[in-house]
């Protein structure tokens, strides 16, 4: 089942705080969820795409789609926050310069999560793989793009108004591939190398995760104990991934970014085909 289409079908019950009860998880599930969070947090801090691991893991343990999505936002907040802090500590991100982007992204994400109640996000599943594919092709034919900082093509203010609200809304509304879109925007329009782009992407992911989490928590759609198990792994993974990105550099981040973007696109194509009657 595509969790995003399932969310739209269950949105009314989420709004009324009547959500399916979570299953009773066996004790061994919690170290497994911790390990998934650790790996996902590490990969996500480097190049995004951690949701390819976390959401299917939660669904595989029997969490209904609304609970799985809300729990994924909860545990993802720890990973993106940990990675953003680690990047800032190592000088890749100036958090003071991210204030406008953080605020606008949070506003957009909350609006996107709210819009899920009345709009079926399934149509995006057919569009996003093509956009991700275009990014992959573009980056393939620009092999040096993102290896060094370049002159920006857009000022930060208009950039964050456009992408903060737009990608924030998308992340709250649907989400897959948002890290790839942030990264390519930072590289092409603000002139960041891949390491700085990864750091700034994590700041914006943290903003949208928190805003969407506020919506899901208010709706009662967060399963806290499994989320905490994954969050513990995400805290460590976020720091580890930021460390790897900073020490290995842009040439290390770039191929992982392309691979994760391709995997997200393939996952969405599969989900779209599986949803057809």
Image (cartoon, rainbow, N blue to C red):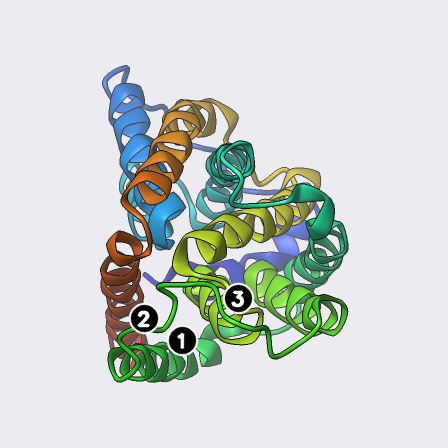
**Measured Cα–Cα span from mark 3 to mark 1:** 24 Å
Q: Residue at x 74, y 59 (%)?
A: 104
Tell which tag, 3 or 1, sits nearer the viewer. 3
Q: Which residue is mark 2?
A: 268
Q: Is residue 226 visible?
A: yes
Answer with left or right where residue 266 lies relative to residue 177: left
SS state under label 3? helix
At horizontal 31% and vertical 53% (from top left) the residue drawn is 52
The image position of residue 209, as x and y in percent, is: 58, 46
- Tell me if 259 is positioned left or right of 103 in this view: left
Q: Whole-Å distance between the Cαs marked 3 and 2?
A: 23 Å
Image coords of residue 163 (percent x, y) = 64, 70
As helix, strand or loop, the secondary structure at mark 1 comes to helix
Q: Is residue 248 above or below residue 122?
A: above
Q: Is residue 264 above or below residue 199?
A: below
Residue 55 visible to an observer of this rendering: no
Q: Quadrant of residue 145?
A: bottom left
Q: State the residue position of label 1.
A: 125
- Residue drawn at the location 62% of the way across and 52% of the way down: 208
- The residue depicted at 47 percent of the width and 68 percent of the height is 187
């Amino acid at each position: 089942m595509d969790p995003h289409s399932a969310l739209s079908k269950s949105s009314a019950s989420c709004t009324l705080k009547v959500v399916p009860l979570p299953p009773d998880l066996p004790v061994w599930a919690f170290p497994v969820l911790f390990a998934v969070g650790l790996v996902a947090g590490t990969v996500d801090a480097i190049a995004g795409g951690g949701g390819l691991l976390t959401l299917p893991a939660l669904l595989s343990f029997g969490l209904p789609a609304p609970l799985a999505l809300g729990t994924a936002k909860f545990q993802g907040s720890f990973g993106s926050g940990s990675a953003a802090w680690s990047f800032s500590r190592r000088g890749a991100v100036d958090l003071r310069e991210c204030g406008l982007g953080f605020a606008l992204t949070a506003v957009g994400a909350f609006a996107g999560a709210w819009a899920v109640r009345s709009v079926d996000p399934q149509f995006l599943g057919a569009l996003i793989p093509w956009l991700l594919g275009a990014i992959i092709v573009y980056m393939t034919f620009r092999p040096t793009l993102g290896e060094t900082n370049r002159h920006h093509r857009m000022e930060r203010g208009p950039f964050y108004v456009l992408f903060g609200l737009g990608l924030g809304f998308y992340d709250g509304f649907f989400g897959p591939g948002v890290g790839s879109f942030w990264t390519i925007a930072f590289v092409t329009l603000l002139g960041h190398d891949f390491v700085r782009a990864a750091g700034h992407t994590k700041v914006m992911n943290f903003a949208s995760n928190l805003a969407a989490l506020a919506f899901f928590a208010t709706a009662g759609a967060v399963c806290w104990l499994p989320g905490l198990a994954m969050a513990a792994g995400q805290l460590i993974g976020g720091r580890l991934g930021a460390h790897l990105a900073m020490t290995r550099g842009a040439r290390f981040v770039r191929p992982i970014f392309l691979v994760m973007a391709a995997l997200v696109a393939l996952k969405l194509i599969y989900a779209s085909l599986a949803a057809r009657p």
